[in-house]
C-alpha cells in the first residue's frame, strides 16, 4: 500500500484520540485516549521505516536501513508502559482521596 | 484487488470504528475492550508493514499487559455504572469541532504529498535484525530504559501506598 494511506489512517486515529481527551471527563478514558494517540504515532513511525527501507532497498538489496525506526517504536512502547504504571497509580491515589475520577473535581492545584 | 489491500482496508475500518467506540461508549469497561480491538488492528498493520517483531510486542505489551492494568484499575474502582453527570453539551461540540478541524488541517496539508509504495524487504522487522541493532548500536538506551522501569516501579509503589493521617495536601512531604 502507498504510504499516504498510512499517514491518513494515523491522522484519523490521532484526531479521535484528541476528541476523546477534549470531550470525556473520566480521567481513565482520557488516559486511554493518550495511549491511542501514542499508537497512532507508532504506526506512522513504522510506515515511515517501511518507506525508508524500500527506498534504500532499491539501491542495495542487502540494506538494513529502517531498523532504527522500529527500535524507536520499541522504546516508545517501553516508555509508555512506564508511564501507564505511574499514571494509573496517580489515578488510584486521587480516587482514594476524592472518591471520583471526574476531572472537574481534580482542581485542587488551582486553590 | 490484492489480498494486502483488502486486509489494509478491513484493518483500517476496524481500527477507526473501534477507536470511535472507545470514546463514545458510556461504560469504561467497554472502552477498554474496544481499545484492545484497536491495538489488535494496529498489530495487523504492523504485520502488513513487515514489522513482525513489533506486532508481537504490541500485542503482548499493549493488549496484554497495559490493558489488563486498565481493566484492573477500573474494576477496582467499581466504575461499571456511568458516572458522568451534567456534562456540558457545548464543551462536547467544541471538542469535536477542534479535533475535527485538526484532522482537516493535517489531511489538507498532506493530501498532495507524493505517494511512495513500499518495495522489497530484507527482513528488518524480524527479531534477528532488530536484536542485532538493539544490542550493538542502541545498547546504552536499552540499559537506561531499565533504570526508567525501576524508577517507574518505585514511583508506582510509593504513590499506591496507603497513607496514614495525612491529607492529600501535604502527602508529598
Image (spheres, rainbow, N blue to C red):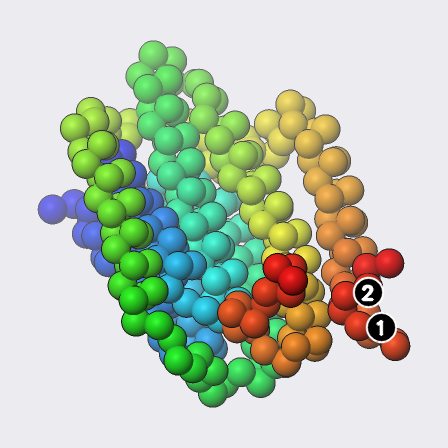
Callout 2 crowding tier (Cα within 10 Å): few <14, some 14–19, many ≥20? few
Q: Are marks 2 and 1 on the same chain?
A: yes
Q: Position of residue B58 (x, y in %)?
A: 50, 52
* Residue B10 found in image quarter: bottom left
Q: CA distance from mark 2 to mark 1?
A: 6 Å
**Position of residue B39 in the picture relative to residue B109 (left or right):** right
- Which residue does the image show at 51% across and 39% down from the upper left? A73
**Position of residue B60 in the picture relative to residue A54 (left or right):** right
Q: Chain of mark 1?
A: B
Q: Position of residue B75 (x, y in %)?
A: 58, 81
Read off the residue under disc 1. Answer: B166
Viewer-proximal residue, A90 or A5? A90
Is residue B18 something one can see in this rendering? no
Q: Position of residue B140 (x, y in %)?
A: 72, 28
**Position of residue B89 in the picture relative to residue B124 (left or right):** left
Viewer-proximal residue, B125 or A82? A82
Read off the residue under disc 2. Answer: B171
**Position of residue B23 in the picture relative to residue A2 (left or right):** right
Task: Give the total number of marks visible in the rendering.
Answer: 2
Viewer-proximal residue, B18 or B124? B18
Callout 1 crowding tier (Cα within 10 Å): few <14, some 14–19, many ≥20? few
- In the orientation shown, which residue stands out farthest toward the top? A59
Image position of B113 with respect to A75: above or below: above
SS label for mark 2: loop
Viewer-proximal residue, B146 or B60? B146
Amino acid at each position: 500500500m502507498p504510504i499516504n494511506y498510512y499517514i491518513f489512517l494515523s491522522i484519523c486515529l490521532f484526531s479521535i484520540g484528541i476528541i476523546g481527551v477534549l470531550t470525556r471527563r473520566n480521567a481513565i478514558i482520557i488516559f486511554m485516549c493518550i495511549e491511542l494517540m501514542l499508537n497512532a504515532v507508532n504506526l506512522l513511525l513504522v510506515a515511515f521505516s517501511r518507506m525508508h527501507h524500500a527506498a534504500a532497498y532499491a539501491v542495495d538489496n542487502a540494506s538494513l536501513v529502517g531498523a532504527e525506526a522500529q527500535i524507536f517504536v520499541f522504546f516508545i512502547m517501553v516508555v509508555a508502559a512506564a508511564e501507564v504504571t505511574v499514571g494509573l497509580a496517580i489515578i488510584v491515589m486521587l480516587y482514594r482521596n476524592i472518591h471520583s475520577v471526574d476531572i472537574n473535581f481534580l482542581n485542587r492545584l488551582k486553590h | 484487488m490484492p489480498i494486502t489491500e483488502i486486509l489494509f482496508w478491513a484493518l483500517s475500518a476496524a481500527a477507526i470504528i473501534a477507536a470511535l467506540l472507545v470514546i463514545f461508549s458510556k461504560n469504561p469497561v467497554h472502552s477498554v475492550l474496544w481499545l484492545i480491538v484497536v491495538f489488535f488492528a494496529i498489530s495487523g498493520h504492523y504485520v502488513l508493514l513487515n514489522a513482525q517483531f513489533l506486532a508481537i510486542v504490541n500485542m503482548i505489551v499493549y493488549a496484554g499487559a497495559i490493558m489488563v492494568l486498565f481493566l484492573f484499575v477500573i474494576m477496582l474502582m467499581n466504575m461499571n455504572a456511568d458516572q458522568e453527570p451534567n456534562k456540558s453539551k457545548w464543551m462536547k461540540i467544541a471538542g469535536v469541532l477542534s479535533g475535527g478541524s485538526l484532522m482537516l488541517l493535517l489531511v489538507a496539508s498532506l493530501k498532495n504529498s507524493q505517494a511512495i509504495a513500499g518495495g522489497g524487504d530484507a527482513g528488518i522487522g524480524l527479531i534477528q535484525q532488530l536484536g542485532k541493532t538493539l544490542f550493538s548500536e542502541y545498547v546504552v538506551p536499552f540499559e537506561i530504559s531499565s533504570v526508567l522501569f525501576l524508577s517507574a516501579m518505585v514511583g508506582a509503589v510509593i504513590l499506591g501506598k496507603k497513607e496514614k493521617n495525612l491529607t492529600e495536601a501535604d502527602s508529598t512531604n
